Amino acid sequence: MTTLLLAVYFATWAFIPHLLLLKKRPAATLAWLWAIVFIPYVGALAYFALGTDRLKRRRLRRRSLYSARSTRSSAPETTTDPATARMLERVSMRDRQFFQLLSRINQLPVSSAGNLRILRDSVEFYSALEERIRGARHHVHLEFYIWNPDGTGARFLSLLVDAARRGVVVRLLLDGVGSHGFTESLLADLLAAGGRFSWFQSLDPKRNRFFLNLRNHRKLQIVDGAVAFVGGMNIGKEYEGLDPNLGHWRDVQVEVDGPISRELQDVFADDWFFATGEKISAPAYFPAPGPEARHLAHVVLGGPDRRNEPISKSIVSLLNEASGRVWIATGYFVPDDVILAALELAANRGVDVRLLISERNDHPWLVVVGRSYYSQLLAAGVRIFEYSVGINHAKVMLADDRWAMIGSANLDYRSMRLNFELNLLFHSAERNGELARILEHDFNLSQEIEPAVFAKRPFRRRFAEAALRPLSPML
């Protein structure tokens, strides 16, 4: 038996060449190497389930602005419609150049929104989504990480069934891990009414899908190709503050229409094509933009199919661009070295950098790991607030008085490199100010971390932070 166990142990070292060929960041490579070699069996099993962080997938409608071989010093056309182009001409040269930078990072054009409404909690978001589904005439496309089989989930399924019965095309795309409690038996009425459903990425060797680690964390909802929702909220009673184990839940979503809706429809179409092989390309799914463009906007996509880590680079670019303030709310905080350095540098040059982090969440060990970075940030002048009246799940970033970003990505390794994520960045002094008031309210409900007090925390907490921090690249 001992010989067999030793043989199996050394056989697990076969994962090491695969690990090295992935060319992960050195810290992540060393962390996984340490796990495979020094944690027998468990480390190798964990690597098999969680170690891969890249995949290739075909896209239905790739809209690339810049060729990798381009040597042009000025950007080609960077917008999708004349109205957006006219808006872009009216902003400052510096802001145009920054949009050009973001377009190169994300390989997506600058777009715009007509109406842009901040939905500050589940009451506003669920009400708006329900209204749009009831009024849908052609299609409803919903993409969520979590759809819980509770009263809230049943309510929205009923809305989808009603829509399908009146002839609306309904497509529902869920993540198999995030929505693990959801069973396809719950979809009987929807499927009978003509609705369509798919898991984003299930374990399917026939389709070359072997990994459970690369999850679709996007939250995207589109109705009739004209109105779209993006943010951090899923479907479940906890988002309404009805889960007694979690209590009050803080989150933010944004509703947009206009040209940006076509860009977001492209995102859904690509994800649906990857999951099902079905092409969504008929003109009815991409109607001409209605309202006049009022806010410049840009889609920021991240995922293991994008090697250049566009969400991370977009966040760092905003930190580098800011001269007055950068306020960030994140549900989970486990920054990599690049984002950590950008936060410090912004604070060092006098920018008002504030972090709003949940004091507790559904993964308590992440709170412990996140606190291991506090001393370094506090020393640089970053102000840190822990949201203490419930769960803060919002993902919001403000830069100065005109840039804002809302979406699904947290400031952690998983959002930057492993998950499929979707953020929406917009250029609007009006909406920036509205979000600033929301964050100011949340700061007042939070406990600010004082450097002198934090330095005196018990040894057991400091040791736990130090012990878990090396695992950051694996979380």
Image (cartoon, rainbow, N blue to C red):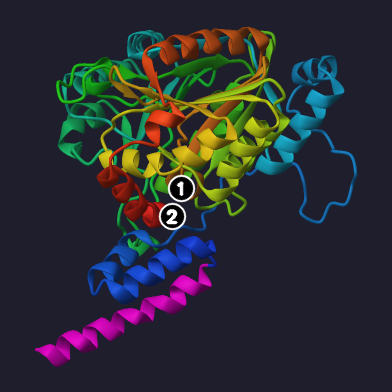
Q: Position of residue 341 (x, y in %)?
A: 61, 44
Local secondary structure at mark 2? helix
109 or 324: nearer the eye?
324
- Range of residues picked out in magenta: 1-22
Residue found farthest to the left: 1
Label 1: few (<14), some (14–19) or many (≥20) C-alpha neighbours in 10 Å:
many
Q: Is residue 285 magenta?
A: no
Q: Is residue 175 visible?
A: no
Q: Residue at x 53, y 12 (%)?
A: 435
- Which residue was labeled with disc 2? 473
Q: Is residue 171 visible?
A: yes
The amino acid beneath tag 2 is Pro
Q: Position of residue 137 (x, y in %)?
A: 44, 14
Q: What is the quadrant of residue 262 in the picture? A: top right
Q: What is the quadrant of residue 78 in the picture? A: top right
Q: Position of residue 225 (x, y in %)?
A: 53, 21
> Residue 413's mark?
1
Is residue 235 toward the left or the right of residue 472 in the image? left
Q: Are marks 1 and 2 in contact (CB under 8 Å)?
A: yes
Q: Looking at the picture, does residue 357 appear above or below residue 126?
A: below
Q: Main secondary structure of the magenta part?
A: helix
Q: Looking at the picture, does residue 220 appear above or below residue 9?
A: above
Q: Position of residue 303 (x, y in %)?
A: 50, 47
Calculate the distance from the C-alpha at mark 1 to the C-alpha at mark 2.
6 Å
